[in-house]
Amino acid sequence: MSAAVFVVACNPQEDSKLPYLLRLPIDGALVLKARDTWPRAARIYCHRFEDVWPFDAEVLEEVPARSCRRRGAVIDLVLDRPRLARSQFVFTEIRGRPANLLADAEGGEGRQPGREDPPRPGDPGGLRDHDRHS
């Protein structure tokens, strides 16, 4: 793999409650099982994939990564696409067991659907982020 690429595929483990595989371009291609492909409204539970990347994986998406950096217990991922480009993988413990959470790094997490954000100072015409990017 010459360029840094974030890959999403179907998890071949049919009995898993985590139907997706996420391959991060860090640490020799870190692979996680996940409940969803990207955090759109809430955090997503992830868990380390114990096997090697399946050679026959059904790839759903491949996106070039602008950066993928470890910061302590967090991996910051920035993809080269206009929307849903920033995320954080948080490595922690839940009930004494290792757990990974995938969270939106753009501030979308915790927003209430239908609730508008206040205008930002200097925003032309009071446009909100979602108005600009829709």
Image (tube, grey):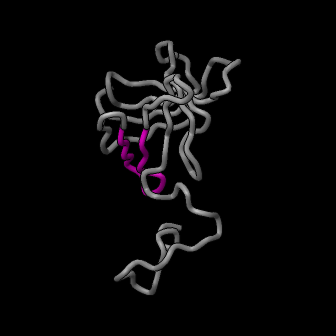
Q: Nearer the viewer, residue 90 or 122?
A: 90
Q: Which quarter of the image is occupied by the C terminus? A: bottom right
| Residue 33 occupies quadrant | top right
Q: Position of residue 83 (x, y in %)?
A: 47, 56
Q: Position of residue 30 (x, y in %)?
A: 40, 25
Residue at the limit of the structure toward the top, as seen here: 51
Residue that appears at 36% across and 81% down: 121
Q: Nearer the viewer, residue 6 or 75?
A: 75
Residue that appears at 60% across and 28% down: 10
Residue at the limit of the structure toward the right, as seen here: 15
Magenta run includes residue 84: yes
Q: Which residues are magenta?
A: 75-89
Q: Nearer the viewer, residue 2 or 134?
A: 134
Secondary structure, magenta segment, majority class: strand
Magenta run includes residue 56: no
Left or right, 60 with respect to 106, comes to right
In this rendering, the answer to whether 117 lies above or below 22 is below
Residue at the limit of the structure toward the front, as seen here: 96
Q: Position of residue 4 (x, y in %)?
A: 32, 34
Q: Which quarter of the image is occupied by the N terminus? A: top left
